[in-house]
Image: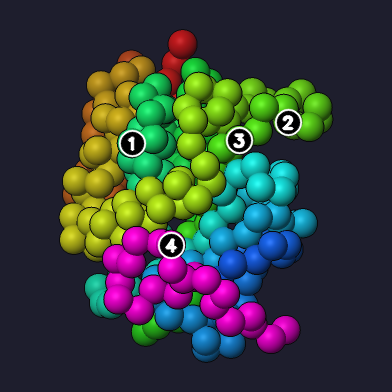
Amino acid sequence: MTHPGPIDSGTCTPVHSSVRTFRYTDTDSTNEQALQSVTEGAAHDGDVHVALHQTKGRGRQGRPWVSAAGQGLYLSYVHIPKPPSPRPEAVTVAAGLAVLDAVREAGAAGAQLKWPNDLVCDGAKLAGVLVESRGLRPEAPHFVVGVGLNVLQREFPEELEAGRQVTSLVRLGVETSCRRMEELVLDRLPRRLAQARRDPLALFEEFLVTANLRGTEVELVTGEGAWVGTCAGIGSEFEVELALEKGPARRFPLAHVQSLTVLP
Ligand code: BTN
């Protein structure tokens, strides 16, 4: 499929001098468009793909991302880092923190991160991040950072609300627009991605504190089982340290952690 040219690049705060914004009225998925441009060799670091409406917006674990026209921010950011490349988990955490920075700046003071990439407010999902790569080559790594943020929705489809609690900025009483949220996210994201390269451990630590995980009793789930203990921090080899109720502390590589939740 031929890639559409940039339609409008005038309103984003250009953090990179070469920022290009590809705007779609309708598309399947901005992550898909961004990944295609990478595959075609047409992508630049810092390219932004943003849609008013997605027909096949996707979330983690093969779930759809409901993308009502003009109601949310549906954005994908192409990150082609210079070496040394950040760890994929650091890119996800950096993106989550960038969206958190943006929504707090907009006025959603109660927003919080939930492992690994959910943004929630009082338990209801406000935003999600999906980081994808296609044919990642160690010599030329790339990441497509997809951000879905609920902005103006007062209602959600029944089936979505039946599955889990969801919210939007307008439901939280924050008056803003999708374009304003785009500007805020694009202002924060490159800085957080730079931090992911420069000091990933500090980023993970900030994540643990921001998500109220550090020093808290948590349940940690990997493909091998579930453990309950106190989250003691992030080890130098990028593992979550858990002080178990019985026995010695255990370390779990970040890449193996499927969920990390605060126990009620
Ligand atoms: C999740 O929480 O499951 C992640 C949701 C990510 C949704 C965004 S919307 C823009 C970008 N394009 C997609 O198809 N998905 C991401």
First reached walking from the N terminus: tag 4 or tag 1: 4
Q: Amino acid type of disc 3? A: Leu
Work out whether residue 260 or residue 189 is closer to the camera in this orientation and state it.
189
Q: Amino acid type of disc 2? A: Phe
Query: To which residue does mark 3 refer?
Result: 152
Cα distance in 3D space between marks 3 and 2: 10 Å
Nearest-to-viewer mark from 4 and 2: 4
Cα distance in 3D space between marks 4 and 1: 18 Å
Residue 244 appears in the figure: no
Nearest-to-viewer mark from 4 and 1: 4
Residue 210, numbered circle = none
Nearest-to-viewer mark from 2 and 1: 1
- Label 2 residue near ligand 1, CB within 8 Å: no
First reached walking from the N terminus: tag 4 or tag 2: 4
Label 1 Cα crowd, 10 Å radius (few <14 / some 14-19 / many 20+): few
Query: To which residue does mark 4 refer?
Result: 11
Nearest-to-viewer mark from 3 and 2: 3
Query: To which residue does mark 2 refer?
Result: 156
- Residue at 41% from the left image edge and 44% from the top image edge: 99
Quarter of the image for residue 248 reads top left
Residue 105, numbered circle = 1
In the image, is residue 18 part of the stretch drawn in magenta?
A: yes
Label 4 Cα crowd, 10 Å radius (few <14 / some 14-19 / many 20+): few
Q: Amino acid type of disc 1? A: Glu
In the image, is residue 170 part of the stretch drawn in magenta?
A: no
